[in-house]
Image (spheres, rainbow, N blue to C red):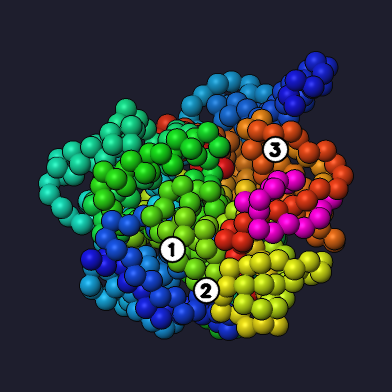
Amino acid sequence: MVKSVPGWVRALATVLAVVVGIYMLLPIIVVAISSINSERFLSFPPKGLSLEWYQLVLTTDTYLQPFLTSLWIGLLITAIAVVVGTAASIALTRFQIPGSQAILSFLMAPIIVPSIILGIALLAFLSVYADGASITGIIIGHIVLAIPYVVRTVSGVLLQQDRFTEEAARTMGARWWQRYLLVLLPMCKSGIFAGAFFAFNISFDDAVVALFLRSPSVETLPLAIYGRLEFSPDPSVAAVSTLMVLVTVLVLVGFERTLGLGKVMA
Amino acid sequence: MADLVISGLRKEFGSSVALSEITLDVASGTFMSLLGPSGCGKSTLLRCIAGLETVTRGDIFIGNENVTALPPEKRRLGMMFQSYALFPHMTVLENVRFPLRMAGEGSKAEQLERAKAALERVQMGHLAARKPTQLSGGQQQRVALARAIVSQPRILLLDEPLSNLDARLREDMQIELLELHRELGLTTVFVTHDQDEAMSLSDLVVLMNVGRVQQVGKPEEIYGTPKTVFAADFLGAANLLPAVTIAPGAAQLAGGHEIRVPAGEFPAGSDVVIGLRQEDLRLNTEGDDNSVPVEVVAPVFRGAEVQYVVSYGEQRIRLIAGKRGPIIPAGPARLSWRTADAFVLPPA
């Protein structure tokens, strides 16, 4: 099959891959370079070089406080989405549940619905039935957005596996909790890690839902960046963005080292 | 001593009946096959014995203990699944150790020792540190077998264990299964749809169709004296000729010829089916009790034997002749057989 691909097609594929790679990476590189600009305003190319913006980002509350807020919200979302998404995946793939297809579609729906609609809907809902925009609203919105990713990755892993393993464990004397702890959950592991990674990123990255549901007392990192960009666009925005990219890359490398990225993303 | 007793077992899935009136008595150390076409209920019966399905009615006894209400984890059986069901996240050695770990038998070191011994038993000792996904199908199967026998189960259950292997490996595994069975003396229940496999491996064959036991017996008994058209056809694909009994020991074939048959329980005038094994039929031979005119359609030379397809009226009849004697060409011939070789069966 591979043999029949002519040389010029392969060359074309390589060229395309390089072009797409540049297209995707170039903005990030521009941001990274802008972040070491010594000017007061965000501009490219930089006139002079300086790390002062990193100092500002890492030592003042401008970004540090929003970063900590985003961090704990992200970790909370990850924990909840992993528990709910894994439980749902196990239920939907390992048990015969009436309407399981409908339940799956329902859980996956937030991936299709634009998050701006989710934000508006949540705001309207919370304004009627609660005190309007609040951090609780942001958390609810992020949970809704994150669960489909965990369901997709965990049920994907489970569907690939032999579905008789739990029965086999039963015939070998494993009680229900042993079947979960020693067989089923370890089998889900790569899916759970991938889902957790997505869930955290969805929450940590989100500006749309947070924009609708922000309250004066709460500022997440994307909101802080957005606000800064609007009112005083200095290179600190580029510095914090570069740091976010770095953190994401580090997490990915960590996955690659421990689990193998191909397996996690499969 | 009966090791496995099943009495009056019935299994329903919703409104459909998967198994009914299953009664079996299996002596200790027996290698028993559950044989039948797909959908006959053989796998469901195996799952009932394992406890993976609850039974609707009836009882299952293992070594005089009524296990009908026991969950599978308390039945102390060894089961090998068609897909092998190895745990992908554990090494081969950990897989085989798992039943011992669950039973909490001995220290970890002892468990590992026994797991290693079981792996050696199936010649997989050298792959103990691998993950199951790194093994070939045949190797995975050996590991699954080691895992099923490691805890010296009361009964070994095998669900079509050879069906995923190619022909060559399958033959090797058959021989190994027999050796293992002789060595360990485990009462074994073996599910298969392959009649050759069932006949060559089993002490006892349970022939099943549409959720019922059709016939139970040693392979040579079922082959030699099938009690139903299904049994005659499924084991050895006998020729089946519709006929009517006309007197004790005599019948008239649908083609009009009168033949002699073993005297049986059918009164004169009954519709019956005459079963004839391919190897019991001869062409153009003197001295047989019965003969009818046929037309040879095609002789097929197969080296050790010659297979003929002949037509008797509308009916096609297959027979196998030894390689001695001339090959009979297409055209008219006489088909003959001994009365004692025919069996008279109730119509299906």
In the rendered view, does A179 fall on the left or right side of A123? left
Instruction: Tell me the magenta residue range.
Output: B280-295
Q: Residue furthest left?
A: B107
Q: What amino acid does circle 2 point to?
A: Arg
> Furthest residue to the top?
A7
Pick out the residue farthest to the right: B331
Q: Secondary structure at mark 1?
A: strand
Q: Given this view, does label 3 or label 2 mark the residue nearer the observer? A: 3
- Disc 2: CA contacts within 10 A as few (<14), some (14-19) or many (>=20): many
Q: Taking B253 as reference, is A112 above or below it?
A: above
Q: Nearer the viewer, residue A46 or A144?
A: A144
Q: Tell me the number on the disc at residue B217.
A: 1
Q: Which element carries disc 2, helix, strand or loop?
A: strand
Query: Residue A17: horizontal and vertical position, in percent?
Result: 72, 26
Q: How far apart are labels 3 and 2 at the CA level?
A: 36 Å
Residue type highlighted by circle 3:
Val
Chain holding disc 1: B
Give SS at disc 3: strand
Q: Is residue B299 visible?
A: yes
Query: Mark 1 and mark 2 in contact (Cβ < 8 Å)?
Result: no
Three-letter code, disc 1: Gly
For disc 3, the neighbor class at 10 Å (few under 14, some 14 to 19, many from 20) is: some
